[in-house]
Image: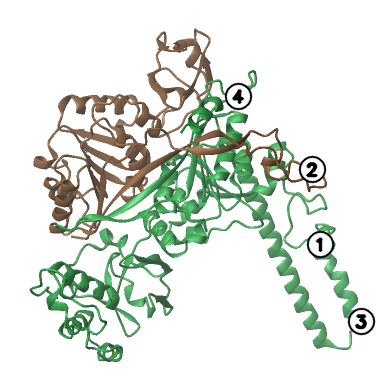
Amino acid sequence: MADNGDDDSAYRIKEGDYVVLKRGDIYKAVQIQPKKKVIFEKQWFFLDNAVGNLYRTTFEIVSGALKLQKPKDSGSSTDAKQGGIDNRNIVDDGKSQKLTRDDIEGLKEQGLKPQEIIQELIKNSSTFGDKTEYAQDKYIKKKKKKYENTVTILKPSCRILAMMYHGREPGKVCHLRYDTLAQMLTLANIHAGSKVLVFETCAGLVLGAVMERMGGYGSVIQMYPGGEPVRAGVENFGFPTHFHDTLHDFPICRVNALLAGTLDTTAKEPTAGGDLKQPDAAAGEEQKQPGAEQQGSPEEQSMETNSAADGVQDLEREEKEKLREAKAQEKKVKMEEKRKKLAAAAALLEGRNADGLVIASRFHPCPVLMGLLKFLSPSRPFVVYSQYKEPLIECYTKLKEQGGAVNIRLTDTWLRHYQVLPNRTHPLLLMSGGGGYILSGMTVAVDRSKPSGSRRAEEPAPKRQKLTDTEG
Amino acid sequence: MSFVEYSDCIQDGDVAIIYLSHDSMMPVKVQQGAQTQTRYGVIRHSSDLIGQRYGSKVTCSKGGWVHVLHPTPELWTVSLPHRTQILYTTDIATITMMLELKPGSVVCESGTGSGSLSHAILRTIAPTGHLHTVEFHQQRAEKVAEEFKEHRVDHLVTVRNQDVCKEGFGVTGVADAVFLDIPSPWEAVGHAKAAMKRHGGRVCSFSPCIEQVQRTCEALADQGFEEISTLEVLLRVHDVRTVSLSLPDFGPDPSPPTHPDGSEKSAPTSGPNQTAVSLKTTTPPREIPGHTGYLTFATKPRT
């Protein structure tokens, strides 16, 4: 099993990696941190033993730690016994299993492996032998799922994280289903080297998905509402650090100023002009001059003369003053960084030549779309996601009135999984209506000469429609 | 212009998409001196296209107008000349995400067919990935190779004219993902496994018939693939319509009016003036595209 180290290192779990824990269809995103307990499917354990192993390795959880699973263990050793023909004589009285819950707990405490527990359950089931082979198979599968104590460690990807969020915390991602996200990424033509605008309140999932498809090339500008961009979900993707160089952000409360040309991002001393929002807008600070720090000294000196007798108090005050100065300096540096970032993002937006726009939020999509479309070049795609259809109907109508877009479509997708087994193939749950809706289109050059009403209306005249509706 | 990189202005030699309406689009090879006929008249490439910005409105000789769009794989899918049945964007989008395609991915695909999926893959794996695509029909293989060149993506793709079931993809141990859209995918599963990286990867098989799916799932399990899952994705289009619904006439209202302001805010039936209510809603189109095929995905473990 010895391989050349360089080949493998990209596929081995390292400390600090963002990974996804998996058991069956349950996923959870965590970071590998030493001596940090994680909880997954009602079990607590440390991930330390995972480090150095390959991704996609399955571990057993034994006494709160991970243990490599021996390949033989993972095989199914529980063979179905000879079964019955059908279930006409099987009575479900809840008494067919002789082991009690306490008995089973006892087995667990004895340290029996899941297969062994299942064997015991089969032995003590009065009806198992009467079940058909298919029913026995189903019973074993069900018990395996219940008594499993394994966990697989996966490398994160858009696919896995989208499925995780949809299954685990749909509310956090505006109930965006993973196939809907897939449609959005393709319809918006997300690819390396483009400049994409993203406005989302999906915990950073959409932003991360866009970044994954950009591969670290081009730029992504996150337009964000409120004070700070939220992108916890982006961390879960475990991108290499250079990806973050392509990620910018811009507060939407500055969009109007940017469009009007009044956004000032030059280095200035903070004045009451209010260009840059100061995190703590204490009036006193705003009026300080560049030499603010130096002014501290005469103050200091006056304080010193007041308490000249008490040397210790002076020292304390000096320490406090130094701390305050250091903090103020830190703040200044941070403000400067923030200003630079704002200026960089503004520079990317000013040209109004973005290549794509993706919107997925709990905000009403119509004003968001109308406000951000202005930043796109002509002949570029835009995609708007909404949990509900009606706000997108409004967007559609507005776009048609205003012009500047073609190929506008309102769609949703139905997803259906299948169980494929010999003589037992059938569809499973139909996931429709729970994945949200998408409005997509393509920008075109705005025609100022003609009225923007589309001559080739994609809506048939209401008159014709009425006839059809009142028939019968 | 290229299918993997945007540009602003139309140039001689570009492939541009003429957009007439949402169900009428055509690709055009832009050439000095050439002309294109549309139902709104003639478009003269030299004066109307070359040098114009993508997204511009172009007035045709008869007075009607169209828009010229920068090509994207999605626009190509709905306007390309079919040589075979193609995959549409809904399935393509699902495949792209479920195969975890991204810049740098190495992908093997068979059959190439008309190149609908191929263009979408190339767009996603550019600039550092590669597509190895296999097509057993000689003319189709040649045609698609020509198109890749015209679309300026040929540096990212290798077309092989061979039978994937007999000879495989022509490469081994390099692919992050394999896609199969052939009549007997179970015969190519072994080759798919060989083409994939030792460290593992993703595979997808597209089949219209459930029997094909069953045989493929069996073959995948036999070859040691994991996480085998079959699904289908259906697109539902909502056409926005303004609809007028008539209001019934139950005759004059016998009770005296009780509203002090006599406003229209009360039930619509109160006023004899309103005979219909207008509302904006959506309706499904007359024909909904239904089943295209089943998508089976699986993961190749480390071997």
Tell me where residue A382 appears, x and y as whole percent.
Answer: 51, 38
Residue at position x 44%, y 51% in the image:
A433
Q: Check if mark 2's residue and mark 3's residue have beta carbons within 8 Å.
A: no
Compared to residue A308, the image places residue B240 above or below, namely above
| Disc marking residue B262 | 2
Q: Is residue B9 visible?
A: yes
What residue is pinned by disc 1?
A285
Q: Quadrant of residue A23?
A: bottom left
Q: Which residue is mark 4?
A: A453
What SS does tag 1 mark? helix
A352 horizontally vs B187: left or right:
right
Q: Which residue is mark 3?
A: A306
Is circle 1 on the same chain as circle 2? Answer: no
Q: Mark 4 or mark 1, which has the lower sequence index? A: 1
Q: What color does chain B have in the rendering?
A: brown
For the N terminus of chain B, the quadrant is top left
Q: Is residue A238 visible from the viewing direction of this image?
A: no
Say which element carries label 4.
loop
Residue B186 horizontal/vertical position (percent): 13, 48
Query: Chain ID for label 1?
Result: A
Q: Residue at x 16, y 46 (%)?
A: B212
- The mark nearer the N terminus, 1 or 3, is 1
Image quarter where the C terminus of chain B lies is: bottom left
Q: What is the C-alpha distance between the residues marked 2 and 3?
A: 79 Å
What amino acid is labelled 2 in the image? Gly
